[in-house]
Image: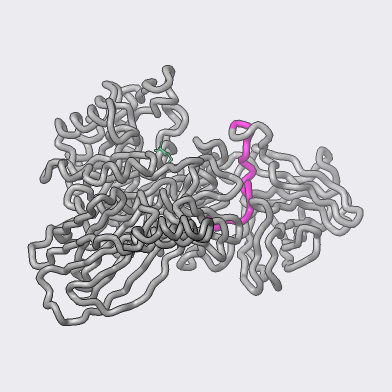
Amino acid sequence: MANVFCPSLLRKWGKTGLFLWIQCLAVSVAFADPIDLTIFVDRSARPISPNLIGVFFEDLNYAADGGLYAELVQNRSFEYSPTEQPDWHPLKFWDLQKRGNGDGSVVVANMRPIHKNNPHYILLTVRTPGQGVGIANSGFGGIPLAAGERYKASFWAYQAFMGQMWGPGDNSKPMPVTLRLETRSGELLAETSMQIQGRRWTPYNATLVSPRAVSDAKLVLLAHEMGGVCLDMISLFPERTFRNRQNGLRADLAQAIADIKPKFIRFPGGCLVHGQGIHQYYDWKDSIGPVEQRRSFRNLWGYSQKVGLGYFELFQFCEDSGAIPIPVVSAGVCCQHAGSSPGRGKEGLPLEEMPAYIQDILDLIEWANGPVTSKWGSMRAAGGHPDPFELKYIGVGNEDAITPIFKERFRMIYEALKKEHPEITVIGTVGPFAAGEDYENGWAFAKALQLPMVDEHYYVNPQWFWDNLARYDSYPRKSTTVYVGEYAAHDRGRRNTLRSALAEAAGLTGLERNGDVVVFASYAPLLARRGHTQWTPDMIYFDSVNVYFTANYYVQQLFGQNGGDRCLETELAAGDSKKLAASSVVDSGSGDLIVKIVNGADTPANITIRLAGLSPDAPMKAVKTVLSGPDADAVNEDAKEPVIKPIQSTELVKSVFTYEAPANSLTVYRINR
Ligand code: AHR
């Protein structure tokens, strides 16, 4: 009706008429023919994976050091090297301090390391003590301190032998040192003193409390007598880490991940699993045990990886956030882009090395699940976790080109795992794309081997998700299942637009509807430190004090918090709208019926929701959460005031009710029957 009148308004009132006409048009679209969404509560609900939504953690974009790992000192073990970045070296991010006429030097040494995996340390020599000679570290662009928070400072040290070569000094007396937290300009915030004595590597610990919040502090260690000390593993952690773990995780970031209610965590990669060449794969054995004995190595993404956040911490994080651990190991091949012919240059471990490599994978299972009396189980217990981690899944390979070299090695690993650990579900790989040669060959190989599950990846434009809502409808049932291990909608400019998030939400309705085939799904990448991103878009951005939640994050959170274990038959008569998607599930635990509606159009959708089979008059309490924003191009820039965020309300609904889904929105109705 409104449209009939509007052209005459336009003729009569010029610009004002045009404005009114646009308003009328919006109203007419909003009140266009209602769209029917029927949820057949009376028909039998299909069992689906209760674990659909999880996360994929990979150390890129400074996700680990300078990210999720709560360590505040950068290059604590003096292992940075030019192989990582051309201007990096063992003293990178450390500054020599000579206070109040003090004089001395610092050199890098490797003659008596704490452990062979941690070869470098420093020799700090004091010639004139003045008010102290030492070193300072500003962390990852300034150490953030919170008012009244306690920080655990620690280092390893021994007294250097001071012969003629190094100058005077008396080893019979301890070396007094101070550990200080200072502002960038050198104002003292907290200080503690200790004495270093003896010629053996010894750990020293102290607690420092910052009186006020500072975003760019530094940790300073000063020696106060003539002589020398060797130092390594100079570290500073907030006492308050996620679940207060030692060597723990940054509380706000870990909480942000836990708030998704991830049902699983896949780690440590991605491409990181292969590393840069055939012997550069991520060796889980280097990532467990005392942190001073772990071997840091060049991260595939071009920086240093200290593996302080290693397998132990990752398994513990899974446990602390109620997630199933899914470690991924290389299939005994390097990445196809790292071999001699880029693209298909897959190279494999020499076959004679495969038995040892396979044994490493078997050892991983023993480490995770074995009794404390077993060799590797005892190492897990020594790390502080006598109970098994209950590992049930292992990913073998990541986005591999399905070449004969790959197949031969994959088969060897798979057969060994099947024989020794039939209780473990092996997840294979079907290449880097949603279709194409590796996808086809990967699936054919998986079918031939009767693999229980394969890992699909797709980074695609938002429209792809809308065009492929029915992708899994035709996948065979009771066969190899799917883990969508990496996916994201890459919008123009690779920004985290609302459009991209809603495309992913629409895709997720398709996965929920096919939750009998798709068992797990994880957006990628998860984390990115602002100023250190190698890849965009990402789900959660952060700096040293803030966490920035993207629209894509909120989509994951809404699906993660509102999953179900049974899927209801759902009919959406969307008419001409090509940007409407819906799914409905039941969470048997609470009995709640959960309906998700994605409207990716720039106009509202007027929907009549029919819960077929429920009594027509009984009102039911519903929690409604709407994620929306000003328009499809909107992005969240500010941590404190994101423009796109979920808004929750409660209402009473009946078995038939109407809902106007806002333009560009995801709505979740959680109905308590
Ligand atoms: O998620 C970033 C990268 O994308 C992963 O490391 C790799 O598996 C994929 O190509």
Image spot of residue 594 (x, y percent): 24, 66
Q: Quadrant of the C terminus?
A: bottom left
Residue 617 spot, x, y in % from top left: 15, 81
Q: Quadrant of residue 342?
A: top left
Taking the spot 85% from the left edge, 43% from the top edge, the residue there is 167
Compared to 157, does 298 lie above or below? above
Question: Which stretch did the figure color magenta?
Answer: 69-83
Of residue 73 and residue 584, the one placed in the foreground of this image is: 584
In the picture, measured across the screen, residue 256 lies left or right of residue 390, that is right
Q: Which residue is at a point 80% across and 60% down the rendered structure image?
A: 186
User: Ligand 1 sits in which quadrant?
Assistant: top left
In the picture, measured across the screen, residue 529 lies left or right of residue 596, that is: right
Q: Is residue 327 visible?
A: yes
Of 328 and 229, the residue lying toward us: 328
In this view, the residue farthest toward the front is 12
Q: How many marks?
A: 0
Q: Report which quarter residue 490 is drawn in.
A: top left
Name the residue at the right extreme.
101
Q: Position of residue 266 (x, y in %)?
A: 35, 48
